[in-house]
Amino acid sequence: MQQREVDVVVIGAGTAGMTAYKTAKKANKRVLLIEADQYGTTCARVGCMPSKLLIAAADTAATVAQSHKFGVNVKSMQVDGKAVMQRVRDERDRFVSFVLNDIDSFPAEDKLKGRAKLLDDHTVQVDDHTCITTNSVVLATGSSAFVPKELLDAGDRLVQTDDVFYWQDLPKRIVVVGAGVIGLELGIALQRLGVEVTVLNRGQRIAGISDPKVLSYAQRIVGQTVQLELDTQVTGTELSGDQVIVHYTRQGQAHQVQADFVLSAAGRKPNIANLGLENTSAQLDDKGMPEFDKDTLNITHTPMFFAGDVNALHPLLHEATDDGYQAGLNAAHWPQKPKTIDRRAPLAIVFSEPQILKVGQSYAELESSQIRIGEVDFANQGRSRILLKNAGLLRVYADKQSQRFLGAEMVGPAAEHLAHLLAWSLQMQLTIKQMLAMPFYHPVIEEGLRTALRDAAQNHT
């Protein structure tokens, strides 16, 4: 077995791992990047980018379908599922190629393919061919789709979110289990492309919305697009020819739905199995997750750092990049005291239709008696109505005394853009008064934000 000695081992060549590698290299350290599977980040290969390609096709189909409302009559519209999925795959592969080019630029001696296992705090074995001694380790192994055991009898009719972007054609009908971010994005996009979609959700909460008013609004709008079944419990699946039957209960009553596929969108789990964490000084919980400092990403009592989706803190690309930078920096300078970094304002966007945002602290995280709330319903908001996108509700939260902006939740038009304005305001620690002093052009959807801010400024309860 080959023996190697380096300063930093990075396990996992995704967004966080690649950033950690580059950061440690800039500190003039000997770094080894280990990857067990094919190169290419989750975002580029099976996440952000291919999902947005599918959503772009859905947006186009929806625009054509409602063009008659503008007096523009299109004689016929046909969704070519094979062509839709071909473009998704082609463009996805193009985005992946950029990542592969980045990987190719790394020196060959800095890369190693194989499955890594920790033998102790400072020793990593890769398959049966290499044993590495290292000063520190960055664990950036990412996450994978969680599949409830009740779905396993679906056989080849069971698909995970990663599988969708390898489809050759669109199905006629699909059941989506889970109304989180991924479930809503894919479910609504597929419905708008002509697929009959049923979404089964275990509770009332969808897309992580905590504000009861925004949640109620979102449930109503989403329920007008897909068949949304809330407070359900999937009890099992069975095959029926080339179809799958999904059994579930709701309010004590048994139901079933038949489809071409059942899509598990019940969340993701950290890739920590078989890493050998039990061989290290890490303190593990009953699920095998190590205890770690969320401010420094240092795994307690070890020279190891936890970066990206694997730590389950913020499964977002820009957060994974920040994690990778912080973990790479601290690993490079170990055993110096790990440093904290200034993190960006919390920002989350769901690319459903309409879109959903959460910025800063959510409604559930705030003490309602200590905040003032401003809101706007987009039903009569000028530009939104012009675009026939006048469905949505934005609620902003501010400190009752200082009027400092604290957070917001929203379902509605242009949420991806409003989210950035709100996040920038939060990061700059602006007050409602300071935000209202900014320019608002007319007529734009952002004027709806101004309405909500004015409401917050006047609302002392």
Image (spheres, grey):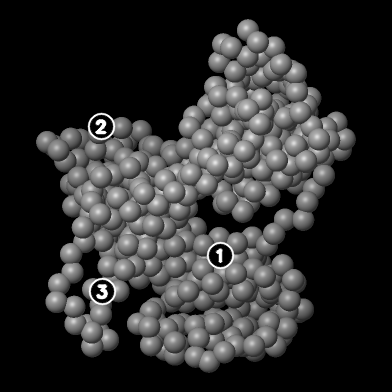
Q: Which mark is residue 358?
A: 1
Q: What amino acid is at disc 2?
A: Gly
State whether residue 455 is above or below residue 89: below
> In the image, is 206 to the left or to the right of 118?
left
Q: Residue 155 carries which label?
A: 2
- Say whether residue 301 is left or right of residue 257: right
Image quarter where the N terminus lies is top right
On screen, residue 303 versus residue 178, left or right, reads right
Residue drawn at point x = 15 percent, y = 72 percent: 76
As drawn, the label of residue 64 is: 3
Q: Nearer the viewer, residue 404 or 416?
A: 416
For the residues labelled 2 and 3, the Cα–Cα distance comes to 36 Å
Residue nearer the viewer, 80 or 152 = 80
Q: x, y (%) of residue 339?
A: 82, 44
Q: Residues within 10 Å of mark 3 (few under 14, many from 20)?
A: some
Q: Earlier in the sequence, mark 2 or mark 1?
A: 2
Q: Is residue 448 placed above or below 214 in the rendered structure?
A: below
Indicate the secondary structure of the residue bearing disc 1.
strand
* Contact, mark 2 vs mark 1 (Cβ under 8 Å): no
Picture residue at 59% right of the left edge, 33% below the top: 12
* Position of residue 120 measured from the top left corner of the image (x, y, whole percent): 71, 17
**Which part of the image, by quadrant, shows the C terminus?**
bottom right
Residue at left offset 72%, top offset 67%: 427
Return the residue nearer the eye: 97 or 348. Answer: 97
Q: Residue furthest right?
A: 336
420 to 105, vertically: above or below: below
